[in-house]
């Protein structure tokens, strides 16, 4: 079963379980306390950064994401965001500051990053200035969530789920999680981190890269991520793991 099929099955089951009077509150944080099992995960130091870029980078040690435990993550999936049902409605798009008709590359661009930047590295030597790059894909955000961008090197899964991850991160950055956020919301990566990781993926896996050229993401005076340290499927797996909808039932009403 594909990730998209799993998302659809989850969304259909969730939609049946939600009552009609919850629809008005689907994008608002519910009152109450998260499930104890999730709180245990939230308090485990080893998983504290699981949804953050630090968790991603530590998980990649050993060349794969098999050590990445997504139990803390499971943010809303492409299906959650595109179907106007389940835990959220299109009201959440306004909270995230994204329109359904926005071009993907209006948001996935270094020009929109405020807390970090990309740098080009040639033969191991970082260039002096920041590297400017905008995604080559201008498809509407909604069509990206529907899988419109397809191609080699896990492009469809990576674009679909990075778009959903960006919506999740932007929603939370603008206060969408409320005062009692669920565990996955507490360690979710920032919009800049989502954009930076996706752009690193695209630069190395959807472009012709000259020999000796690499790219890295820097924030706060430190190198956060290096493009050639990940395989295409690892980027896809990571974005799927933080935007697959599995924890949505613990939020929204």
Image (tube, rainbow, N blue to C red):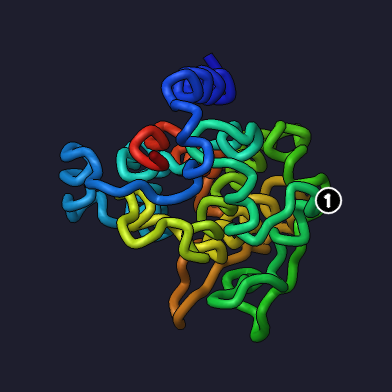
Q: Is residue 131 above or below residue 108?
A: below
Q: In this view, does 99 lie above or below 144?
A: below
Give coordinates of residue 9: x percent, y percent. 51, 17
Name the residue: 73% across, 53% down: 99
Measuring 44% from the left and 26% from the top, which residue is drawn there? Answer: 18
Give the quarter of the image for residue 53. bottom left
Position of residue 5 measured from the top left corner of the image (x, y, whole percent): 56, 18
Residue projecting furthest to the front? 21
**Would residue 238 be found to the left or right of residue 228 on screen?**
left
Residue 26: give x, y in percent of width and height.
Answer: 49, 41
Residue marked by disc 1: 138
Query: Could you tell me residue 139's position as x and y percent?
Result: 82, 45
Res 115 → quadrant: bottom right
Mark 1, secondary structure of its residue = loop
Q: Which residue occupies 41% across, 32% down?
A: 246
Q: Is residue 76 visible?
A: yes
- Disc 1 crowd, CA 10 A, few/some/many (<14, 14-19, 20+): some
Q: Which residue is drawn at 56% across and 66% down?
A: 192
- Give the quadrant of the C terminus: top left
Please give left or right for residue 251 compared with residue 159 in the image.
left
């Amino acid at each position: 079963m594909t990730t998209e099929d799993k998302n659809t099955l989850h969304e259909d089951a969730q939609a049946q379980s939600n009552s009609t009077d919850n629809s008005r509150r689907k994008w608002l944080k519910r009152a109450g306390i998260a499930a104890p099992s999730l709180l245990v995960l939230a308090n485990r130091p080893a998983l504290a950064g699981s949804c953050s870029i630090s968790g991603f980078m530590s998980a990649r040690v050993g060349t794969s994401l098999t050590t990445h435990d997504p139990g803390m993550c499971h943010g809303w999936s492409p299906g959650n965001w595109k179907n106007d049902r389940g835990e959220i409605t299109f009201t959440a798009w306004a909270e995230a500051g994204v329109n359904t008709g926005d071009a993907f590359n209006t948001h996935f661009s270094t020009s929109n990053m405020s807390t970090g930047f990309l740098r080009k590295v040639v033969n191991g030597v970082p260039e002096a200035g920041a590297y400017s790059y905008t995604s080559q894909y201008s498809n509407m955000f909604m069509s990206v969530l529907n899988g419109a961008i397809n191609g080699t090197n896990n492009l469809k899964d990576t674009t679909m789920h990075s778009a959903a991850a960006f919506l999740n991160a932007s929603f939370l950055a603008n206060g969408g999680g409320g005062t009692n956020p669920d565990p996955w919301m507490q360690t979710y990566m920032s919009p800049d981190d989502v954009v930076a990781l996706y752009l690193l993926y695209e630069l190395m896996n959807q472009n012709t890269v000259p020999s000796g050229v690499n790219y890295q993401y820097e924030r706060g005076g430190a190198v956060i991520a290096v493009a050639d340290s990940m395989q295409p499927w690892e980027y896809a797996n990571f974005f799927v793991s933080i935007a697959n909808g599995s924890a949505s039932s613990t939020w929204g009403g």
